[in-house]
Amino acid sequence: MQLPVLILALLGCSHITASLVSQLDASMPMDLLLPPPAVSKSQQLFVLESVNNIIDLTRTIYRQETTIVVQPTDNKQTQSETIFYLAQPLEASNKVLALFEVRVKNKKGQLLAIRKDVAHDHLQYYTVTLPATTLGKTTLYVKSIYTKHVIPYPRKIKQLEPQLYEIQGNAHFLTPYKSTRQRTTVKLPNRKEPSTYTKSPKPVTRKDETIIYGPYLNVPALSRSPLYVHYADTQAVLLAKEYTKYVEVSHWGGNIAVQEDYELHHKGAELKDHFSRIDFKLSAQAHSETNVVKDLTAILPKGARNVFFKDTIGNVSTSHFRNDRESSMLWIQPRYPLFGGWRYSWFHGYDVSAESFLKKISANKFVLQLPFKSSVKDITAVSAKLVAVLPEGASNVEVATSLDVDQISESVIFSYLDSTGRPAVTIQTKNLIDDLEGVVQITYSYDTMRLLQKPFVVFVYTLGVFFIFIIYSRLDFSISPDVAKDKEERLEIYRIKISEIVKMDSRRFTDVSDAFEHFKSTRNLKMLDQVYKTADKDSADMYRNLDDIATLATLIDKSFGQSVQKLIDLLKERTKVARTMQQEVQNFIKDTSNGSDQAKKRAMNAQINQSLAKVDALCCRIASVLEHVGE
């Protein structure tokens, strides 16, 4: 088998068809890779007594956990001969390797420093230094995690169709050393029988949730045997194309504010047809067998408070917050269920006490320890950014992290009442996963006297405004009286009075109409006459006031005065039309012979409708004139 095919098999960059799987089941010779000279020398020093390789597919990220028993070929090796080599496919190392760590498997679980070494023959070599005390037989624990390696196949499925994933890898553990005994175990997420999986090299055992390859004896260095598994899994592959965590430290309030922004993409099998809300509602019991994501859970620190959540169009999704003794939980239900190929953007945040993450290590020196990873589990952040905003006046900023980050930069940002700005540290990385327990440690100096800086700025600002106001009030900037402004101010007073009078007249008009409707049912003419009398008296006073305003306004603006006079005429006309119609109805009611004459009734109704139409038209004209007066 040629090397490019191997690399594709290891990385999942191409799909293995059924015919290719059948070929892999057959025994086939494979050319061995040749290591670089330094690695060739190391091959003479170590042999792997046993290799127990576990490929964990219980989650939607490809995890490989390997226990290696390393046996020196010569127990008299010197300290300089403790360099041990590991290998990764070069393309995987550059693109999809999210975590690579090596520990000595003992009580302490010592983590060994990994150094990238030479790249040779499509492989990237790494070195670790075995502790001097472990010369002799050494047990190492190697953990590798790859993103974008678990691929849905078929790529598109129907709404209620189960989801299948495929992975491609190596049935042998890729190592530059010979192995006396190797075994690879593939852990599946459930007991369902995989659609297809590689059945060679023998022996291959299928048991419960596992597929066991081996044990294989006397495996050559850099040996590989393509492995393919096509299996069912309802879990979603969730990628945050953009994940940003904002942290703002406040010594004044003893508070740390945190906000996390997400642009989430569901990278599971996409919907083949359009989404049906009806089918979704009717198939609630079958949702657990599909890849739909109906809710998300964020685990927040203990003591989180002032929790908030919003998506791109506001807080229209459902969310619940629960604060327990050990941690807090924010449950989020998006506005719509997430299927493969769909995306959802939101941000949530909270406040915590500063003492949760901030420690004082000397008189004026503090250390801020922050977790970088997302608070929502099982999300891979393709592009992750942490922005830590320190208090104004912080200096001597130092950043340390166990993560392999792409960039660390410092800047100054300004917020409310800032005078010199706040130092901000921005850290960017890629392929951030849950397993990365990376803590960002930011050390800085901060004089507690700086706490008075902001109140002092407020005091100076207030004092400055006060003096400016005093100086301004004593200056006379006027050259001559502003006739136009004086005219406009007087007209504005008239507009307010006119608006109030018209409102009063409209209320009185409505009261009369209501009283007339009451008269039609009670026939109480005496009460109606009393309402008429009161309304006429009030209207006379209002029209007299409007006349006075019209007279005075004409002296300032003739057009304005004419408009007011027109308004008076329209108000009177509206009252006259309504009263005429009401009098006609009273006469109709008094004539008892009209009760049985349907023709007269129809005529009366027509006359009423005509009068009401005139009233409506007059109301529109009144509103128009009033609007013109208000301009």
Image (cartoon, rainbow, N blue to C red):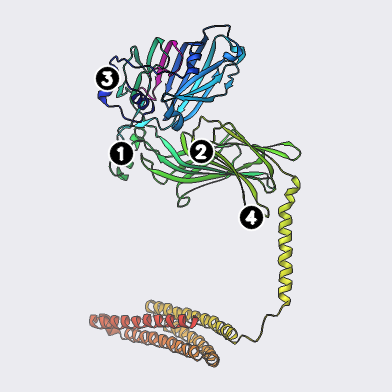
- Res 357 seen here: no
Residue 431 position within the rendered picture, expressed as x and y whole percent measured from the top left: 48, 35
Is 542 one of the magenta-colored residues? no
Q: Nearer the viewer, mark 1 or mark 3?
A: 3
What's the distance in space between the residues labelled 1 and 3, CA to CA? 33 Å
Identify the residue position indicated by label 1 in the image: 159
Disc 4 marks which amino acid? Answer: Tyr
Disc 3 marks which amino acid? Answer: Gln
What's the distance in space between the residues labelled 2 and 4, CA to CA? 30 Å
| In-front residue for pair 202/80 | 80
Q: Dot 1 surroundings within 10 Å: few (below 14), some, or many (20 or more)? A: many
Q: Is residue 405 left or right of residue 284?
A: right
Residue drawn at 52 percent across, 83 percent down:
498
- Res 423 seen here: yes
Q: Quadrant of the rendered structure where residue 239 is? A: top left
Residue 475 position within the rendered picture, expressed as x and y whole percent measured from the top left: 72, 78
Residue 270 position within the rendered picture, expressed as x and y whole percent measured from the top left: 33, 39
Task: Please tell me which of labels 2 and 3 falls first in the chain.
Answer: 3
Picture layout, residue 531 above or below residue 25:
below
> Is disc 2 placed on a helix, strand or loop?
strand
Identify the residue position indicated by label 2 in the image: 298
Disc 1 marks which amino acid? Answer: Gln
User: Which residues fall within the magenta stretch?
Assistant: 171-191
| In-front residue for pair 301/476 | 476
Identify the residue position indicated by label 3 in the image: 23
